[in-house]
Image: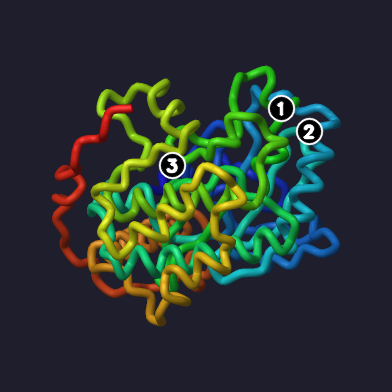
Amino acid sequence: MLEPLPAGAPPRHVGPYRLLGRLGSGGMGEVHLACRTEESTRRPGVDVDLGRLVAVKTVREDLQVDEAFRARFRREIDAARAVRSPHAAGLLDGDSGARLPWLATEFVPGPSLAEAVDRSGPLSVGAVRALGAALARALQAVHAAQVLHRDLKPANVLLAGTGPKLIDFGIAQAFDATALTSTGLIVGTPGFMAPEHLEGSRAVVPATDVFCLGALLAFAATGRGPFDHADGEMGAVIYRISRADADLTAVPGELRDPIAACLRLDPAERPTPEALLTLLGGDAPDPFPWPGEVLSLLARHAEAARTCARAATGAGAVAELPTFGPAVPYSPTAAVDRPPAAPP
C-alpha cells in the first residue's frame, strides 16, 4: 500500500517529477508515486502532462552503475517504450544519464496480484481465465517489440478496473551482468522462474515468459506457487523448477491443462501467447470479472493515492484517478486454507 512521505519534509524530485509517496522497493530500486511539476525539462519524445501521476523507479544507490549499465538501461527504455497494450503499463519517460538512472511509467492505482491473493484468497476460475488471457495479450505486445519480461511474477502484475497491468517488462535486462555482479542478485524470482533462468540470461527466450505466466496463474488459482515446498526450503524449490516438477493438484480442473502446457520443461513445447489465449477460451470479457474482494482493494488503493496526491499537490493532480464506489467488506479466509505443498 502507498506510504506517504514524511509530513513537513522538503519536496523531493527525480527529474521533472515530484515524489509524493513510496509505492514499494525491490532488488533493483525504489518506486514512488510522483507527478510532473516542471515543464522546462521536457525532452523530445516525452509527452507527460503537468500534474499527471506516474510511478517513478530509481536505481538503488548500491548497484554498480557504470557506462555498460547505462547503455543497457537506455536500450531497454527505448525498446519498452514501443510496447503498446491495454494490459501493460506504458513506459513514459526515463533518464539513463542521471546519477541514479530512473524511469517513469503509467501509474496503476491498484494492488499487485500478490497482495490481492494474499488479502482475499485465490481468484475464481473465470477471473483466472480472464487474467491469463489479458496477460497473454500483454506478452504478445511485449514480444512484438523484441522485449522479454524476464521477471513475470505476481508482484509485477498490478490490478486495475479494466484488468491486469503488466509492469517492469524488459527492464530486468538492464540489471543483468555488471550491475548485479557486485550484489549477487539474479534476474528472476525463485518460485516464478523457468528452468532456463537457472542457466543464465543467454538461455532466456520468449517461452520463458510463458512458463512464468503459467506459474503465476497457478498462484492466482490456488494461493500458492506450483513449486512451493512445505518447509519453504529454497534449494527444494530450485530443484523442482529445474525439472519443471509443478504441483497442480489444487488447480481447478478447467485450468489445469493450459497451465500445465505453460509449465513444460522444454521451451519449444510451451504454447505461444497466441496459442495460450486459445487454450484459455479467448479474450477476457468486458467488464473484467474481478470478484468483489478485489474491487474493494481497488477502491482502497485508489483512495489512498488520491489522498496522498491531494495532500501534496492539491485536488487538480488527482482528477485522472478512477473511482470504484464504496469499498465492499471482505473476509480473507481462502488464503489460509491452502493445501500443503508436495515434497520435492
List x then y, in percent, for residue 74: 80, 46
Of callouts 1 and 2, which one flags the residue occurring earlier in the amino acid sequence?
2
Q: In the image as oriented, which residue stretches furthest toward the bottom?
A: 286
Of callouts 3 and 1, which one flags the residue occurring earlier in the amino acid sequence?
3
Along the horizontal axis of the image, is 32 left or right of 95?
Answer: left
- Mark 3–mark 2 contact, CB under 8 Å? no
Q: Which residue in the protein does label 1 denote? A: 179
At a point 68% along the width and 35% down the height, the residue shown is 201
Cα–Cα span, label 3 and label 1: 34 Å
The numbered dot on residue 69 is 2
Q: Quadrant of residue 54?
A: bottom right
Residue type, numbered disc 1: Ala
List x then y, in percent, for residue 335: 21, 47
Number of residue marks: 3
- Mark 1–mark 2 contact, CB under 8 Å? yes
Local crowd size for mark 3, using a 10 Å CA cut-off: few (<14), some (14–19), many (≥20): few
Cα–Cα span, label 1 and label 2: 6 Å
Along the horizontal axis of the image, is 77 left or right of 284?
Answer: right
Q: Secondary structure at mark 3?
A: loop
Residue type, numbered disc 3: Ala
Residue type, numbered disc 2: Phe
Q: Secondary structure at mark 1?
A: helix
Along the horizontal axis of the image, is 252 left or right of 257?
Answer: left
Q: Which residue in the protein does label 3 denote? A: 7
Local crowd size for mark 2, using a 10 Å CA cut-off: few (<14), some (14–19), many (≥20): many
Q: Secondary structure at mark 2?
A: helix
